[in-house]
Amino acid sequence: MKRPDITMLHKYMCANRALEVVCTGQIYFPKAARFNDPFDCQIRFEQTITPEEFVEAAFRTYRNDGHDWPSIKKILDSCLKPDGSITDSKLGEIARVANEFQRSNAGLGVLSLSEDPLSILMWAHYAQQHQGACVGFRREPCNTLGDGDITHPVEYSDVYPEARFAEISSGTGSLSQKVLFTKARDWSYEKEWRRTCDQGDQLKNVPGPVGQVILGLRTSPEIVEKFRVECATKEIRLMKCTIDAGRFRLSAEDVPNNEIQPTK
């Protein structure tokens, strides 16, 4: 398992949704198109492809698919004009594939998680202004959070993801990774990891066992009691944020489970 030092990944959310996750074992995967950052999960295509780039990409693709040279040459000949330029129909096909790639990516489900459960900014932005919760999922070799091909960190960059049409003609797998796992450096404080699925806007089973829940500084006593009951039943560690004296820093301390009070 890559990055074994990261034993848990966390989701900041409002209290009611966090309680549903604990109770039902399911979590919502939104579509990438719904993200609040209009730059997120987008890519800019360089609208040109040279005949040399096309031939190289096509040869590599068809060879990997098991075609022999005579069949590859026949395919290439059908895509090139007598002067060696790419036919208009093939250019149109590549453009359609590029548009379909963008449309398909926008419909994928993306679960955003964080390495850091005690980020001041994350609590303010994503956890109902400290009235919500941060749910921690165990990252283990036997679940999808521990599978580096399925869940891995976001790369932060000052450069917008870009691809040439040649990359589209040779397959979109690596492009999807570039699009879905690249964000502006401004977001680096999130320390984000992502887990994707084929269709967004759906509830899915949690990607790993819930290992802990941290409640915010402003979580109401009634909500605390609801979490106390559920976490005690499911043997989930329950904590609550505290402020480090004299510092702009959060800590967390355990919420006692031995005297569960009825919810009012």
Image (cartoon, rainbow, N blue to C red):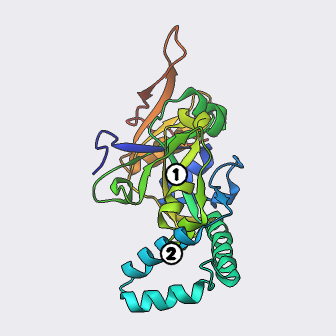
Image position, residue 171 (x, y; %): 50, 71
Circles 2 and 1, Cβ within 8 Å, touching? The answer is no
Assign a secondary structure to mark 1.
Answer: loop
Depth check, front residue: 96 or 251: 96
Q: Residue furthest top?
A: 246
Q: Position of residue 39 (x, y in %)?
A: 68, 48
Left/right of residue 24 with respect to residue 86 in the rendered view: left
Q: Residue at x 64, y 50 (%)?
A: 40
Mark number for residue 181? Answer: 1
Taking the spot 48% from the left edge, 71% from the top edge, the residue there is 57
Q: Earlier in the sequence, mark 2 or mark 1?
A: 2
Please indicate whether residue 226 sits to the left or right of residue 66 in the image.
right
Q: Amino acid at mark 2?
A: Val
Classify residue 7 as left or right of residue 207. left
Real-space CA distance between mark 2 and mark 1, rounded to the nearest whole angstrom: 29 Å
> Is residue 45 visible to the viewer in this orientation of the structure?
yes
